[in-house]
Amino acid sequence: MFDNLDFDVIRRSLPYLFLDGMSFTLMLTGLSALGGLVFGTLIALMRLSGYKLLGSIAGLYVDFMRSLPLVLVIFWFYFLVPYIGQWLTGASRPIRVGAFTSSLVTFIMFEAAYFSEIMRAGIQSISKGQPAAASALGLTYSQSMRYIVLPQAFRNMLPVLLTQTIVLFQDTSLVYVLSIPDFLGAASKVAQRDGRLVEMYLFAAAVYFVISCVASYGVRRLQARIAIVR
Amino acid sequence: MNYNWNWHIFFEPNPTGAGTYLDMLMSGLLLTIQTALLAWVIALFFGTIVGILRSLPSRTASWIGFGYVEFFRNMPLLVQLFLWFFVLPELLPRGAGLWLKQIPNAPFWTAAIGVGLFMSARVAVQLAAGIASLPRGQKNAATALGLTTAQGYRYVLLPIAFRIILPPLTSEFLNTIKNTSVAITIGLIELTGQARAMQEFSFQVFEAFTAATVMYLAINIVVVTGMRFLERSLAIPGYITGK
Amino acid sequence: MIEISHVNKWYGPSFQVLKDCTTRVAKGEVVVVCGPSGSGKSTLIKCVNALEPFQEGQIILDGIKVNDPKTDLPKLRARVGMVFQHFELFPHLRIIENLCLAQEKVLGRSHDEAMAKGQKLLERVGLTVHANKYPAELSGGQQQRVAIARALAMDPIAMLFDEPTSALDPEMISEVLDVMVDLAHEGMTMMVVTHEMGFASKVAHRVIFMDKGEIVEDALKTDFFGSPRSERAQKFLSKILSH
């Protein structure tokens, strides 16, 4: 069954797979998680601000993003980002945007919807007494958010945020639809060039599997530790 | 924004010669729904079995359940579809592999099974959590009445657990629908695929994606409304789920 | 009827919950088991119908060895009724369905037969009008009466009560105790874990006092209340009877 397989193709393409592919994937994952968290926290704050208009705009954004398949959103932004760039810079034509920037914008905007729901739950899980105590000490609303509520919400939600980041790590593989050489894209490129689909896809699957397993094991350990501290 | 909008494009004939661009999108919508429904049946079937395994006291059973869930949860869906579509036929004995490659509508079946198994792991997790959230006494009461383990699950634990997890199951069903779009990579021309095709043929990018977006939103509204109705009709008078 | 001999049970490698427990309940006898919380009394009663496994000793129920791997446990359990502290009615089933489920699924009675039996027992506990309600629509006292009826529907040869009134509001305790007193007067074999000393003095034949997993005192009712031999039982009694 395995006689006509050539696993040496993996060894030969390792530098390309990891130095180019995996570093793209990890960079995209890391920056998207960071951007999604910042943007998502802002959305969560909008929803909980008590201003009806702000709250419903934020709510609509979240519901809208969560109704759409990521693949469609990737296509949307791929074509939209050049126009947004033109509008922002005042250029006369849609500007050219690189694959990385385009995907980064996509994932930040998309993940923000998911991260905002996590942060909202986190903020709501903080007892009402905490902000009350903060304002009793004379802290303003934004100070109490900044120093009291958000740090606790973030800490309580850290395992969930990290789990979502593992999902994000796997989801970045979907940039494949734009023929961008992330890890899977790189593997696929080699696979098609050398006609080694079986070897390359099995290898890619194994790599994603090991990384995700190790990461989620880490999250479980973290969760257990947080549970003890509380 | 210097983009030439043309909303009439939907009513112009599409290049396949069969109907308008709108027809093209509608056939994509239909395929999305068909794929998602079949995938959901598969997800519920395997998810229920694995969810039960995870909740059993037997250590072997819960390890099998754990392994199953980890296997399907720790690989991107796209990679899983590639494994089923490109890799599996090559690893099978020659005859079986050949047969698999020649199945008509292979992308459809691969997508339904691939997405179904991927989602089954999540259904299993939800169900196991639902069963775990039931008071221990419920199982004891069923046992004390002489019900076997299977009867206890069939008549007592599962009916309550499924009611409790109905809201998360709704989101998982929506995820199933959305996830079928990943099958665009193995050549399934569902809704997103048709929108992409329309964009390539007509160059009306934003009209095509807007239409697909509206259709996905419509599916969401229909599903959410339907599930609310189901939740209401299955609600137990006086019983607050989640307590 | 129930013979418990030298039962030892551990949780984990070192924590012993039952220490060499030996006692017996004769046919038609009512035995009350009391003792401070954590004394193992609930665990002991759950060993009788094998809801809890134990490592050493043996329990014989109507001539059948409970801890024999060859024993058909569901069949055995169906012959002993059990009433739980938190009622454990099945929330998704109507009251009458709660009474019918095990009759049909375990005893194989026809639906009509089960319904007739269920109605008769509901009448007996005074809840006929609630037959088509769901458990959560009833008060705690009513739910516990339903739970007793559910157990009686199986025509048990003995009844086990695990703190049947301790989750109830004070004003509902007597309605449940009344049903239990009636049962005792009819000659039902009963093993009752409870702190209701009024009930014990009214209908119990014997009282067992447990502490730290041991049966400290096992005496006729009059002896137990008149002159408990052990200091621990004296202390317990003075505490529980002081208000």
Image (tube, rainbow, N blue to C red):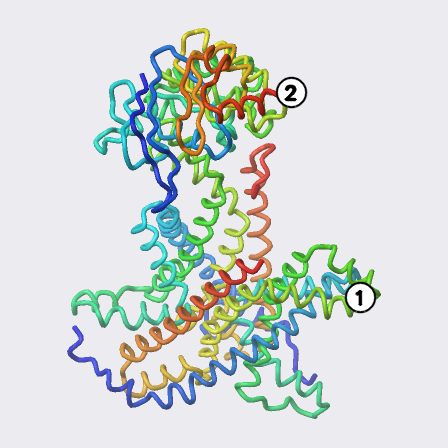
Query: Which residue in the protein does label 1 denote?
Result: A141
Q: Position of residue A120 (x, y in %)?
A: 66, 61
Q: Chain of mark 2?
A: C
Q: Residue B91, located in which quarter of the rendered image?
A: bottom left
Residue A77 versus residue C130 in the image, above or below: below
Q: Nearer the viewer, residue C25 or A4?
A: C25
Q: Quadrant of residue C15?
A: top left
Residue behind mark 2: C171
The answer to whether one can see residue B209 in this image is: yes
Q: Is residue B207 depicted above or below B161 in this figure?
A: below
Query: Which quarter of the figure is the N terminus of chain C placed in?
Result: top left
Q: Residues within 10 Å of mark 1 (few under 14, many from 20)?
A: few
Instruction: Tell me where residue A17 sits by quadrant.
Output: bottom left
Residue kind at label 1, given as amino acid type: Tyr
Q: Nearer the viewer, residue C37 or C129?
A: C37
Side of C190 relative to A193 (left or right): right
